[in-house]
Image: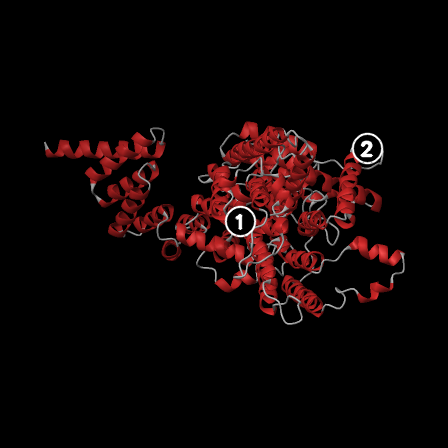
Amino acid sequence: MAVLDTDLDHIFPSSVLPPFWAKLVVGLVAIVCFARSYDGDFVFDDSEAIVNNKDLQAETPLGDLWHHDFWGSRLSSNTSHKSYRPLTVLTFRINYYLSGGFHPMGFHVVNILLHGGISVLMVDVFSVLFGGLQYSSKGRRLHLAPRASLLAALLFAVHPVHTECVAGVVGRADLLCALFFFLSFLGYCEAFRESNKEGAYSSTFWVLLSIFLGAVAMLCKEQGITVLGLNAVFDILVIGKFNVLEIVQKVLHKDKSLESLGMLRNGGLLFRMTLLTSGGAGVLYVRWTIMGTGPPAFTEVDNPASFADSMLVRAINYNYYYSLNAWLLLCPWWLCFDWSMGCIPLIKSVSDWRVIALAALWFCLIGLICQALCSEDGHKRRILTLGLGFLVIPFLPASNLFFRVGFVVAERVLYLPSVGYCVLLTFGFGALSKHTKKKKLIAAVVLGILFINMLRCVVRSGEWRSEEQLFRSALSVCPLNAKVHYNIGKNLADKGNQTAAIRYYREAVRLNPKYVHAMNNLGNILKERNELREAEELLSLAVRIQPDFAAAWMNLGIVQNSLKRFEAAEQSYRMAIKHRRKYPDCYYNLGRLYADLNRHVDALNAWRNATVLKPEHSLAWNNMIILLDNTGNLAQAEAVGREALELIPNDHSLMFSLANVLGKSQKYKESEALFLKAIKANPNAASYHGNLAVLYHRWGHLDLAKKHYEISLQLDPTASGTKENYGLLRRKLELMQKKDV
């Protein structure tokens, strides 16, 4: 049994040490921590990656998943984020199919179970990291560090920084990536089960399987490819027993035995390194080829440090971001769904007090690296090296060292590096326990950390259940984050609380004067409140800052149309269509402008374009029917109405419009059927009953006309036209009664 495990004997009694029970405890604890999120909504990025992602729906061919990014856009598009995760999207699609639509519970349950399964798998991973690779005579791997692996697995299972990955549905990319990442690592370990005649451990099958699983991990999320580097480190330092201290000493003393190092003559190791290198290079080449147009383009608000002119400023801020990530692992109390847009102000001078965090980070890292490479204790050297490897290597794609990333700090990218943190923390507890007599105090601290982290996971999972709770929880962590205020404002606006939404949108614009999306949404609300001048100013500023912002151009056109500035409105609509050619809503609004100007042919053409781009665009179809009806083109109106109902058969507003046309064409029976069908779909629409009453009035079914006039007036007593028609009908009925008398 490993020395470290003996040091932890006072924390875990032997009764819970068998692997089966250890895994059962870890799995249950992991599920309990995040179970509160099982019935949560789709929140934050879930809307774009799932609800608005057409790749989840059966109408989209499965083959398209291999040409689209995580958000459903074509990888070849210049606006694509290049997040190529087709296997994750495939699981979303299966979830959608099994759930019968966008029902979030099924999506959340899968995430929780995945985290539970990964936590169970971690018992085996940590067993290798702490106990090494030793096999019984029957070929079974021995669990030489059951206590250490159980403690580390529990620390991993209950870490609050994992909440974003588990409670946020889009975090499944990180979960699936981690699952195949660890399977790849364990598969690589299987390569050393048996020895060949030369005494070198080698198994091409397991190495190739490990490379394949690494590629699968990468198809779930980009970080997955780093497992190949980790496998190489494991092979060289653990299997090859490469001792840096010994090599340095021999170099300094010009020892001739350096030339005959066993590792350099180990053909099996060189062969495995060749396989890992060529496999990794091949996978990356295919990934880059599929990505197409190079790396994604991010804006300054996404990652301000990467846009700094000074290399020194960039370096200082990148290292400060690393220290913040380390702090989130050490103290995961202040968690936020988004750390961009002013949440972390740039360090522009070495006199900024925050540089202390950089010094503390590197002081700790250098100390650990020295111990990992130069310690004479081989067991200690192996654990620290692997702990640092798991901490650093999976984090490299998010480090800004190789390419610019689209975030400042992201809790989700710490799912894999947290393994290294758990290794180092467990090793630290073992070292403390070994050198102190207050073992009960150490045990109390460990259990306290586990309990507090579990409690934090439960609380944080509750915050991820709805957007309102999630966004408001961020205010205390990142009050300077414009996106936090923007998202709270958007959530309030969706609920109809425009006054409060305006306040948050204004704060977002104050914090980030170039926040065009906040300007656009604020302008929309002001437009609805008829505060048109300020709305025009905001939207004009938005398109000056971002000239290709199609939605802002369209909204500016709507405001200008309301201000009777028709030429400017038309120009704005044209600019919107220029920057987004497939923009059915803009064609619809352009058609309304032409209708106001009595340019009927242009209006019909614009609405027709809207329906070509979006066949289910009910408003465009309705406006075509109504315009043709009002201009006396009843036959054409009827044809358009029938075409629309074939495409959208359950739209009651289209039934109503076509019924009006058929009534004027004296096709009373068919008109009546459509009116009744529309009323069945929307029984509280006063106009539906009123127009059906007019039909019966014309048709001579006066009793039915009287009945529906009365229903219409009950629903809307202020309808003057219905009152007038009802009065005419009553007088007609009275005259008929007098004649009968």
- Amino acid carrying mark 1 in the image: Ile
Q: Nearer the observer, disc 1 or disc 2?
A: 1
Residue located beneath label 1 in the image: 118
Tell me the crowding category of disc 2: few under 14, some 14 to 19, or many 20 or more residues within 10 angstroms, Cα based: few
Which residue is depicted at the point 53% across and 60% down? 65
Tell which residue pokes out farthest to the left in this image.
741
Tell whether 148 sits left or right of 431: left
Question: Looking at the image, is 728 positioned above or below residue 670?
Answer: above
Residue 244: x and y, percent? 79, 54
Q: Nearer the viewer, residue 12 or 356?
A: 12
Instruction: Give the Cα separation between the discs numbered 1 and 2.
Output: 41 Å
Q: Nearer the viewer, residue 83 or 717?
A: 83
Tell which residue pokes out farthest to the bottom in this image.
197
- How many labels were placed on the picture? 2
Residue located beneath label 2 in the image: 352
Residue 90: x and y, percent? 50, 57
Residue 222: x and y, percent? 63, 55
**Secondary structure under badge 2?**
loop
